[in-house]
Amino acid sequence: MAEAASDEMAALYNTANRSLRIRFAHKKRKEGLTVYDIALLLHSSPATIRKYLAIPENEFLVDRTTSWERQQLALQQKQQEADKARRLAREGHPIEQISAMLHDTCKSIQNYWNSSYRITDGHYNARIPGKLAPMRKIS
């Protein structure tokens, strides 16, 4: 239960999750908390909480996908495409036909066939080292 609460709080601290923050503020207000108490919980100003509470509930209840969810969906779709390319190759289709069927380049199809190829490789989760990187303690 403590993990679920901490996950919820971590999501609320992320300002990209504005609809979650607004929903949380309304929920806590219904539970009887004051604007100042809610502001402390959300690490926001009371003025921001007042703005959140001024928004009617029917305007923010629409669940929108977050950028993380869109990224996960894109990764799933790309994985399905790679799996389909591998299946078509096992069935004996030539690479040109597979690339035409999947509307992808021949090089991408070749990458999909490579056993070491992973969808998450590339720019996802890649960190560019800063100029202080050599001085950081390696753990």
Image (spheres, rainbow, N blue to C red):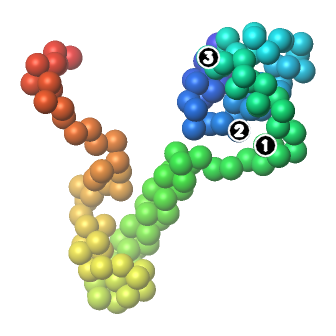
Residue ID for mark 1: 60
Percent position of residue 19, x then y: 71, 38
Write the residue at 34% across / 83% down: 99
Residue ID for mark 2: 19
Q: Quadrant of the N terminus?
A: top right
Residue 91 visible in the picture: no
Bin the neighbour count of mark 3 within 10 Å (Cα to Cα): few under 14, some 14-19, many 20 and up.
Answer: few
Write the residue at 35% across / 56% down: 119
Give the residue type that dot 1 points to: Phe
Residue ID for mark 3: 43
Q: CA distance from mark 3 to mark 1?
A: 20 Å
Bin the neighbour count of mark 1 within 10 Å (Cα to Cα): few under 14, some 14-19, many 20 and up.
Answer: some
Horizontal relation, residue 134 to residue 47: left or right: left
Which label's residue is closer to the chain start, 3 or 1? Answer: 3
Q: Closest to the observer: 6 or 117?
A: 6
Give the residue type that dot 2 points to: Ser
Q: Closest to the observer: 103 or 109?
A: 103
Q: Closest to the observer: 21 or 6?
A: 21
Q: Are marks 1 and 2 in contact (CB under 8 Å)?
A: yes
Give the residue type that dot 3 points to: His
- Of all residues, the one furthest to the front in this rendering is 47
Percent position of residue 77, x then y: 49, 63
